[in-house]
Image (spheres, grey):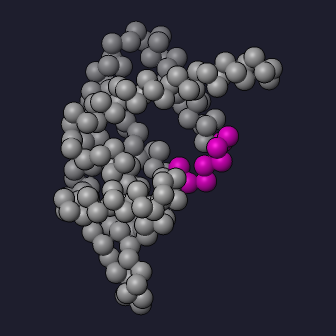
Amino acid sequence: MSETNIDKVAENLMAILPLLHKNLIKRVKSKTNIPVGSLFVMSVLKSHGILSMSEIGHKLAMPNPHITGLVDRLIAEGLAERINEPHDRRIVNIKITEKGIESFIAIKKDISEDLRKKLSELDENKLKVLSGASRQVKEILITIFNEEDHGHCKSLSVK
């Protein structure tokens, strides 16, 4: 690929994130007082079950101190809980609670409905193009960034 094409792709990708952030994050914030980062933590816990803080941080590429703050808030709201490892009490894992699962599903459903309304405004041809293009972009990004574990991407999807 020529440098010009690489530059165009890079520019397009950098333009997508602010658009998504501005529009999707605004919708998330209008639906809940739970920080977006905490929703990502809930998503990972829902997908993977009980995890250590380090494992959560690794899966979300976030530093442990940041994860600790997000998890502490989830615990304070009854959306997650600490689980001590029976054979070593020094090891503390995190698990999403039933209340957390129900909240996550409800928030995801609300956001999905809003997004579906926006997408329904597109004509069938544009929707078909966007469907194929978004799937391809996701697959390519997973490949180029060597995402070994992208289960949390799937769990936040609109399906």
Identified at 56% across, 35% down, the residue is 138
Does 141 sit above or below residue 59?
above
Q: Which quadrant holds residue 7?
A: top right
Query: Does the image show residue 80?
Result: no
**Outermost residue, front direction?**
65
Residue 102: percent from the left, percent from the top? 22, 53
Q: Which quadrant holds residue 22?
A: top left
Identified at 56% across, 54% down, the residue is 149
Range drawn in magenta: 143-150
Assign the N terminus to one quadrant of the image. top right
Q: In screen coordinates, is 150 left or right of 100?
A: right
Q: Nearer the viewer, residue 123 or 24?
A: 24
Residue 136: percent from the left, percent from the top? 59, 30
Query: Does the image show residue 138?
Result: yes
Across the whole image, how many numbered discs are drawn on residues?
Answer: 0
Identified at 21% across, 41% down, the residue is 32
